[in-house]
Image (cartoon, rainbow, N blue to C red):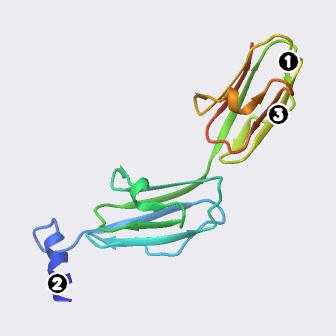
Amino acid sequence: LVNAVCFRVAADSDSDGSLESYTVTRTLASGVKSSNRRNSTEEGSPYSTKLTGIEPKHTVTVTMGANNVTSTAYDEDTNEIKISSVTGNITITVAVTEYTVTNTLASGVTNSNTATKVLKNASYSGTLSGITTETVAVTMGGETVTSEVYDSSTKKIEIDAVTGNIVITVS
């Protein structure tokens, strides 16, 4: 206990020996819960929580102070957030992520799937009709994925897990 007290005082940035208190703010999507309900924590102390109700459509973001610490604090396999030493206010955000679907089709070409939005990690499929000699291009998240997701013999676009905005262009 003496070592812990000495460490905490040594970790303090204030000259009066008091520890800074930081807030913990949670903005959680419907159905998501955090096991740690504390709204504040002390400077230098560890912080951890387990998120329940996480689904593939969710995006988890963890910030401490002005820094995004998601990659080091959040384990997406266990849905646990672990910060070894708190140095600023903590914000945990779990949001439903939707991506846009944009069809830019040549005259007379249609897509059987008219959706303009799709959830993160959801599947997407559509069949193009009215194609003659047009060129088909499909991008997802700015990357060309045509050869992986478009079958020119069936005219079907099939994406198993959407990871970015989809743009379908037939010219």
Residue 6: give x, y in percent of width and height: 14, 80
| Amino acid, disc 1 | Val
Residue at screen point 87% across, 28% down: 154
Q: Is residue 39 above or below residue 134?
A: below
Residue matched to label 1: 109
Contact, mark 3 vs mark 1 (Cβ under 8 Å)? no
Element type at marker 3? Answer: strand
Residue 121: give x, y in percent of width and height: 67, 48
Q: Earlier in the sequence, mark 1 or mark 2?
A: 2
**Disc on res. 126:** 3
Q: Is residue 168 above or below residue 141?
A: above
Q: CA distance from mark 1 to mark 2?
A: 72 Å
Disc 2 packing (10 Å; few <14; some 14–19; many ≥20):
few
Residue matched to label 2: 3
Q: Which callout, 3 or 2, points to the residue nearer the camera?
A: 3
Residue at screen point 69% across, 27% down: 147
